Image: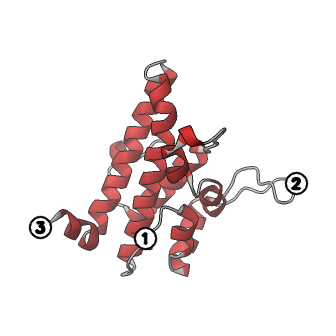
Amino acid sequence: MTQDSVWKHHPLEVMYRANELGRLVEHLGAEERDGVWRHGTTIAIPVLLSLAVEIGLKAWHRIEGNEPPFTHDLLELFDGLGENTRRRLEDKMPEVPSNMPGYPAYPGIRTALRQNRDVFTDWRYAHEHDALIAETGVLKTALKAIVDEFIDEMPSENRLKG
């Protein structure tokens, strides 16, 4: 079986890969907190995390029987999913409202993906930007929702934390 056929015909395997990238990000984050690889993880964490989310969303497209869009834009990938899948993911990571309209206390999955829609592209070329922001906390929560809703039978020790 070729690498291409795994991506096209085995969305569960693809989702496991997205989960493993998320676990790698958790490991890098722990090292960063411990003062190891400070400069390297600053770029690696957002890039790997957004790649994991992208792969996870593309696995959802495959499970729906669709060809995923050829894009790194996380919001475009999310919006291209079927209504039932979007609703399931929104239920898994709902928006928490606040007293200020338009500014949730905690963003739902769609808002998190909108805020981080171009992280993979932008952070790979960080040297071309004056400043970049990646909301890695909500992106990690979005990845957890994407993976957990897809893989019900994954053992808890293999799941993303949080």
Give the Cα separation between the discs numbered 3 and 1: 23 Å
Which residue, given by chain and number where applicable, does mark 3 sit on? 1
Residue at the image point whose x is 82% and y is 53% from the top: 98
Residue 24 sits in which quadrant?
A: top left
Which residue, given by chain and number where applicable, does mark 1 sit on? 70
Q: Is residue 77 left or right of residue 15?
A: right
Quadrant of the snapshot with the N terminus: bottom left
Is the residue marked by circle 3 packed among few (<14), some (14-19), or many (20+) residues within 10 Å?
A: few
Residue at the image point whose x is 78% and y is 57% from the top: 97
Q: How is the image coloured?
A: secondary structure
Is the residue marked by circle 2 packed among few (<14), some (14-19), or many (20+) residues within 10 Å?
A: few
Residue at the image point whose x is 57% and y is 56% from the top: 118
Nearer to me, 7 or 96: 7
Vertical side of 25 occupied by 148: above or below: below
What x and y, as percent, mark residue 17?
Answer: 31, 53
Tell me whether the residue at label 3 lies in contact with that at label 1, contact meaning CB atoms closer than 8 angstroms. Answer: no
Q: Is residue 123 left or right of residue 97?
A: left
Q: Amino acid at mark 3?
A: Met
Which residue, given by chain and number where applicable, does mark 2 sit on? 100
For marks 3 and 1 on the same chain, the one whose residue lies earlier in the sequence: 3
Q: Amino acid at mark 2?
A: Met
What x and y, as percent, mark residue 3?
Answer: 19, 62
Secondary structure category for the residue under label 1: loop
Q: Which mark is residue 35?
A: none
Q: Is residue 31 left or right of residue 83?
A: left
